[in-house]
Image (cartoon, helix red, strand yellow):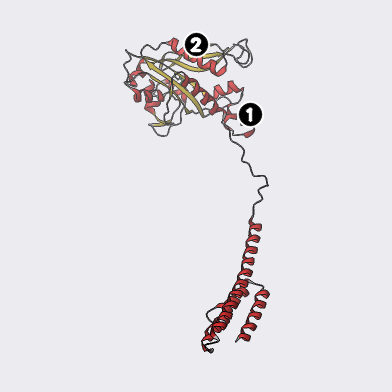
Amino acid sequence: MRKELETLRAEALERIAAARTEDELQEIRVRLFGKKGALTRLMKRLGTLPPEERPRSGELVNEARSRLEAVWEEKSRLWREAALAARLREESIDITLPGTIPPPGRRHPLNMVIADMENIFLGMGFSIAEGPEIETDYYNFEAMNMPPDHPARDMQDSFYISEEFLLRTQTSPVQIRSMEKTCPRLPVKVIAPGKVYRNDDDATHSPMFHQVEGLLVDRGVRMSDLKGVLLHFIREMFGPEREIRLRPSFFPFTEPSAEIDVSCMFCGGAGCRLCKGTGWIEILGAGMVHPQVLRMGGYDAGAVTGFAFGVGVERVAMLKYGIDDMRLLFDNDIRFLRQF
Ligand code: PHE
C-alpha cells in the first residue's frame, strides 16, 4: 500500500504540473479527491490492513492528500490570478486619455437682460409675478379695457386657440391677475416677465417675443413715481448718463399714457443713424392705470391709483448689445450666442 501511495503521489504531481487547461485541472481534482477518487479509495482500504499498520498508513495517506491538495490549490490560484490580470488589462481604462468635454452652456442674452431687469426692480421692492402664456380673451383684452371690437385689438393681431383662448399678446393680463391675488391688500408692486405672441415677423418683430410688465398700485401713486422708477431702471440698464422723456401716447388700459424714450446710447443724444438723427430711442410704453382696470382688479378707483409699464426685452437686448436683427436672438447659432 505504501508503494501504491508513492506511485499515486508521484503520478498526481506530474499530472497537476502537466495540466494545460482549467478543465484538465478540475478533472484531476475529481479523480484524486472526489468521492470515488484514488485517494479516497485508498483511505477506505485502510480498514482492511492489519491493525498495527493502520495508524502509520493513515498518516501517510493524509499527508499525501494535504500535500497534493496544496499543490493543486496553488496551481489553481495562479491561474485564477493570471486570468483576472488579463481581464483587467483588457478592460482597463486609460485615465490619461483626454475626456470629451461638453461645451459649457451659458445664459442666453435675453435671459441675461431679464435677470438684470429682475434685479433692478427687486432692488426697488417689486416682486416677480407670472401668468399663463395661453390666456383668456377676458384677461388679455376685456379686463384690460379692450372690449370685443375695440380697434386697439387690431394692433396685436393674435393667435387664437378658440374663441375664448389665445396666446397672450402682452404681459398686461398679469396686471389683473396680480391685483386679483393681492386685493384688498396694498400695494400691488410686481414685475411680470414672460413670452408674448403676435402675428408679426420681420427684422424687428418676432411672432414670439418677451416683455416685462410692471405694475404699482397703492394710495397716492403719481406719474412722477412712474418717471422716477423708469429713470432709475434705464440708468441701471444703459448707464448713469442716460436721460428719458415721456411722449403722449394711447393705451386703452392707461390714462394718461406715455411712450418713454431714452437718450441715444450710441451717439449720446447728438443724433445718429440709430436714433434717426433725433437723439432719442423709443424704449417702452407706460401710463397711469385706467380706473376701469383698477376696478376690474377689484380695487376702489376712487381710493387708489397706480402706474404700469411694458418693456420689450428683445428691444432692450438689441440696444444694450448692439444687435441689428432680432432674428439672431432666436437662430440658436452658437457663434452668435458665444459673444455675450
Ligand atoms: N401692453 C402694452 C403693449 O404690449 C405695453 C404697456 C404696458 C403699455 C403697460 C402701458 C402699460 O404694447
Badge number at residue 246: 2
The quadrant of the image that shows the C terminus is top right
**Is label 2 within 8 A of ligand 1 (CB to nearest ligand atom)?**
no
**Place of residue 14 in the rendered image (x, y in percent of width and height, measured from the top left):** 67, 77
- Whether residue 27 is visible: no
Kind of residue indicated by mark 2: Leu
Seen from the viewer's position, the closer of residues 136 and 17 is 17
**Place of residue 154 in the rendered image (x, y in percent of width and height, measured from the top left):** 45, 23
Query: Which residue is outermost to the front?
Result: 52
Q: Residues within 10 Å of mark 2 (few under 14, many from 20)?
A: some
Rendered position, 92 above or below 48 = above
Rendered position, 27 above or below 314 = below
Q: Residues within 10 Å of mark 1 (few under 14, many from 20)?
A: few
In the image: residue 292, left or right of residue 5: left
Between disc 1 and disc 2, the foreground one is: 1
User: SS at mark 2?
Assistant: strand
What is the quadrant of residue 31 in the picture?
bottom right
Rendered residue at 41%/10% (across/down): 222
Distance, label 1 to label 2, CA atoms, is 33 Å
Rendered position, 315 above or below 30 = above
Q: Which residue is mark 1?
A: 339
- Whether residue 112 is visible: yes
**Place of residue 177 in the rendered image (x, y in percent of width and height, measured from the top left):** 37, 26
Point out the tag, 1 or 2, that comes first from the N-terminus: 2
Rendered residue at 61%/14% (across/down): 276
Rendered residue at 42%/31% (across/down): 132
Rendered residue at 54%/15% (across/down): 235
Seen from the viewer's position, the closer of residues 294 and 12 is 12
In the image: residue 83, left or right of residue 209: right
Kind of residue indicated by mark 1: Gln
